[in-house]
Image: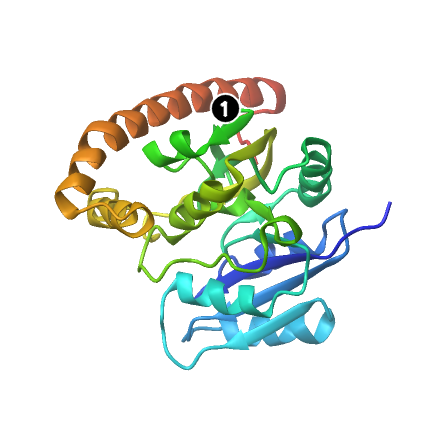
Amino acid sequence: MKQELVSVIMPTFNASKYLADSIESVLNQTYTNLELLITDDCSSDNTRHILKQFAEQDKRVKVEFLKENYGPGIARNRSIERAKGRYIAFCDCDDRWMPEKLEKQIAHMTRKDCALCSSSYLICDENNTVTGINISPKHLTLGMMKRDNKIGCLTAIYDIKRLGHKFYMPAIRKRQDWALFLNILKECQICFCVTDPLAYYRQRSQSVSSNKLSLIKYNVNVYETVFGYTRPKAYLYFLFRFLPSYYLKILKRNRDSKRYVAEQRKKYGTSVQ
């Protein structure tokens, strides 16, 4: 079967510690017809050198360097603008994909005849030790996603042939990925999910999403930007719909994670990677 081109979107910023592993996890996919579009957001560490090396070694790696720091949303959009593939997929510069990720998700999208797909993913720490799992439901609707973001950006794939080359990250500093998926779901209505974990999300103490309290205003901003809510209405929706849904999700994730880690340790030993 012919493999349609997949455009993989990766923003980078001072990512030298984990960057090589992330890039290699994309390039080592069993689904080989891909381009890796990296936009560097004005890094000041060794990131630029690493990117230039990979671009010289593999023609699928295409890098753009920004002269100022604009944030991951703008960096992702610059890569989306350059995308030539039928499918758009995302992998951040500190996350990793399992080798069969693209192959399994594209096959799932073909079977379900859908425009948006995500999957479950494993959670690891800064030393690559698996600490948990986020298990996706079999499908997600706009209503489910409106209550809180249930798609891990590192697992998302959408189909430009079905949707058009018109979806970009909104111009907000944080939570752009959730806003993007909401806008896509307003058109396609459903996201089908692979329930097997297909990626590793790295949980870092200093990551953009690590301080949940500071993200409140950005979550509220999503309701204003995507649905046109007034600020009071956005805060009310956040308090009475988002928060209950979010905490139920976290409780389930913690329960699933404890069970998963215990099973893996029993099977493989004390360190799960």
10 left or right, relative to 252:
right
- Identify the amino acid type marked 1: Val
Category of crowding for the residue at label 1, using alpha-carbon neighbours closer than 10 angstroms: few (below 14), some (14–19), many (at least 20): some
Q: Is residue 65 above or below residue 179?
A: below
107 left or right, relative to 176:
right
Percent position of residue 94, x then y: 49, 54
Please give the name of the residue rendered at 20% of the width and 28% of the height, measured from the top-left corner.
Answer: 240
Disc tally is: 1
* The N terminus lies in quadrant: top right
Q: Which residue is mark 1?
A: 261
Please give the name of the residue rendered at 63% of the width and 37% of the height, measured from the top-left corner.
Answer: 114
Q: Is residue 93 above or below residue 256?
A: below
Q: Secondary structure at mark 1?
A: helix
Please give the name of the residue rendered at 48% of the width and 62% of the height, measured from the top-left corner.
Answer: 76
Percent position of residue 224, x then y: 25, 49
* The C terminus lies in quadrant: top right
Please give the name of the residue rendered at 55% of the width and 18% of the height, measured from the top-left corner.
Answer: 263
Looking at the picture, the colour scheme in use is: rainbow
Taking the view exactly as shown, the residue that stands out farthest to the bottom is 67
Percent position of residue 103, x then y: 73, 42
Q: Is residue 195 above or below residue 235?
A: above
Taking the view exactly as shown, the residue that stands out farthest to the left is 232
Percent position of residue 156, x then y: 55, 44
**Closest to the observer: 42 or 195?**
195
